[in-house]
Amino acid sequence: MPGPFLELSDIRKEYPGVVALDHVGLSVSPGEVIALIGENGAGKSTLMRVLGGVVEPSGGVIKVDGTERTSLTVADAIKAGIAFVHQELNLFDNLDVAGNVYIGREPVYGGPLKLIDRKQMYAWMRPLLERLGADFEPDASLAELSLAQRQLVEIMKALSLDARLVIMDEPTSSLTLTETDRLMRVIAGLKAEGVSIIFITHRLNEVMQCADRAVVLRDGRMVGALSRAELSPGAMIKLMIGRDLKSLYVPPAAPPGDGVLDIVEAVTDTYPDRAVSLTVRRGEILGLAGLVGSGRTELARAIFGVDSLRGGAIKLNGVPIQVATPRAAIEHGIYLVPEDRKSSGLLLDGSIAENISLPDLASYLRFFLVDRARETKNAHHQRERLKIRTPDVTTTVGSLSGGNQQKVVLAKWLSMRPKVLIFDEPTRGIDVGAKQEIYDMLRGLADAGVAILMISSDMEEVIGVSDRIAVMHEGAISGFLDRSQFSEHNVLELAVGHT
Amino acid sequence: MHKKDLSLLVLILVVGTVVALINPRFLLVGNLSNTLNQVGLFGIFSIAEAFVIIIGGIELSVGSVIALLGVLFIDLIVNHDVNWVLAFAIIIAAGLVIGLVHGTLVTRMKIQPFVVTLCGLLIYRGAARYYTEDSTAGFGFGASFPTLEWLTAGRTNVLGFPLPHSVVALVVVAAIAWVVLHRSVFGRYLYAVGKNEEAARYSGIRANRVMISAYIICGGLTAFSAILIAMYTRSISPAVHGSFYELYAIAAAVLGGCSLRGGEGSIVGVVLGTVLLQVLQNLVNLLGIPSSLNFAVMGTVILIGVLADQYISQRGRHGAAKGRV
């Protein structure tokens, strides 16, 4: 194999308070297929964004064809033959396939009129379509293509730019098995032509299938590389974990009580052929682990009545309940602290007091009108209880820090005596200090008898906070772990579906 | 009173003073009374519009609804001998139904409010013209409804000032709307849905119902103002009656601090916005500005007002950002 044309060495990227990449090196030779693996937040996407010219590294050297640079621009990356196939595909639904591939580079005729020469464009498309064995026409409307076909369109776009390296960010996360197989064949074909591939994935069997090399990142550091001969799921998992988890765990004051929330064979729209059953008991924190896209958020949304369940039942204290709307869930005492607090959790333009009272305004009534004095009083009470750092409860929520915003979301529900609290990524984007306060709050609530379901992709959080862990994999529960079985290894094995 | 409302009030006083200085007839009792009457008529449907704008919607059919329901009202009491109280109720009900239809199309069928109400604008205008065969609807000789006329278009002497009853109607409507918007649970829901519909849903608010209600309230209030306007003009040419009124309403709401993105605005602001628009209208007449420039003057003043507001609020935000550590 010829030597590497692209070498990254000593790459660092720091964000305020976080080191996203810490002295990472990586070299790519022509025709090499590299799998980039690691847990959520290990720095894989950041590293690829450095390669794509989207993120400027804080330090380190990028060497392309022998030329050393400190950073790339998007134009540099394209010129160097680096192409990106995004997780969220960047394509135009209103154009046809050829229009998407040649966007911004359309062949023109008619002199100053610059009309698009479709014939020429379609002619250029032919060899690309054949190369990838695509089963659609160059004039097919993009809107009619499946996700897998769109991915091929992105790859064609990369090839039409003479890409030498195609980076794919979790290309198979939304594909069916047959589609995945086809993509694997496409990858093999590109490799044979001398095109290099880097793909980020959580699916270890795919790595086994097509990678020449697996590079493992953890906490922004490169912790190891496995050659083809060394590749095995066990070896990869071993490298992905192995972090020293500080024990955050505070045991419950009393052993958990009876089941409060029973999810019986619940089926969501995302995974119509999988069912989920689990029970959250009084006074316990049940962690719900799994990879992004494993169906955890969808489950939470269905329990809270944002989406409807396709099948199955929800029981509260053993009694089946109907939850068609969030209102219904709230009336049963089931509350959700959503994943994206800015879009679903808060009125960012509203005051703290206004946000806290919103779901429960009926209880602030005096002569049919909102008793604002009582509203303010409760907001002050919650502010002190949750240590929301703000001079006043009339402050606009949008001006608070992430941690304080999350506390406001929490304050909404704490004013209303929760029976079940569902947290979806409770500490995402929150600084360390506020994190600990939220964990303390979780334990306090559990000890007060609340049943808590905590979705989290943060391994440290899931292991450090939960009393029990349920792991989801592709829409189904792949296993439950008791505290004695807690380890990153066990959680990860269940999460990637490797048992 | 909000700071925004206060600055609007100052603007009105400044413009009023300037007009009064140039042409003292501005302050004549007759002129003030007439201007106030206009404020009363325009204020009610501007408040109607504000309800829809606050939830992040828009209602473009206000002028056409005023024409159609005005024509129907006069036709009912003049040509069909319907008791005016009953006719009044029928027209209000028709307005509520129009609002219900608009709200349903927007929330359940997911059609953009601009499109729904634009179609409404065209449909109701066409219906009004067809219904009257494009002729003017009015009161014939001998047709007389003294009680109704006194109630809707009359004036009562208050300390020597002939106070138009339309203003009394506006004050009542504004007071109720103020309580609903700024003090009731429903008002909170309106603002919440306008600020962030998804978060409102996640807080257990039935956002669709709230939005439909806003359109219904808008329809009902517009119907009420349609009756007042019909009784004031006494004759309706369906092709032009009430045209552009939706734009007066939107302008008043925007001047009054409503954001077209929703979630903002106050009733006091909307009323003051209406007052400013009518004073400007009056200014054009009194200062001898060609009436063809009417809209141009209004547009310019609104633009300057909004620019100034933007400038002030941005400076305010910078100041606040500096204050926060």
Image (tube, coloured by chain):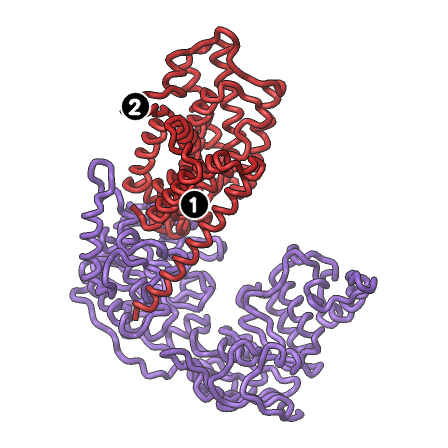
The answer to whether residue A325 of the structure is visible from this angle is no
Between A90 and B87, the one lying in front of the other is B87
Query: Which type of secondary structure does the marked residue at label 2 adopt?
Result: loop
In the rendered view, tell whether residue B55 sits above or below residue A339. Answer: above
**Residue B167 image position (x, y, % from top left):** 36, 28
**Residue A174 image position (x, y, % from top left):** 54, 64
Q: Amino acid at mark 1?
A: Leu
| Chain for disc number 2 | B
The answer to whether residue A44 of the structure is visible from this angle is yes
Q: Colour of chain A?
A: purple
Relative placement, left or right, of A240 versus A191 is left
Q: Colour of chain B?
A: red
Q: Which residue was labeled with disc 2?
A: B160
Mark whose residue sits in front, 1 or 2: 2
In the rendered view, tell whether residue A248 sits above or below residue A65. Answer: above
Q: Which quadrant: the C terminus of chain B?
A: bottom left
Instruction: For label 1, count other residues whose C-alpha is less than 10 Å away and answer few (under 14), some (14-19) or many (20+).
Output: many
Res B229 label = none
Between B5 and A402, the one lying in front of the other is B5
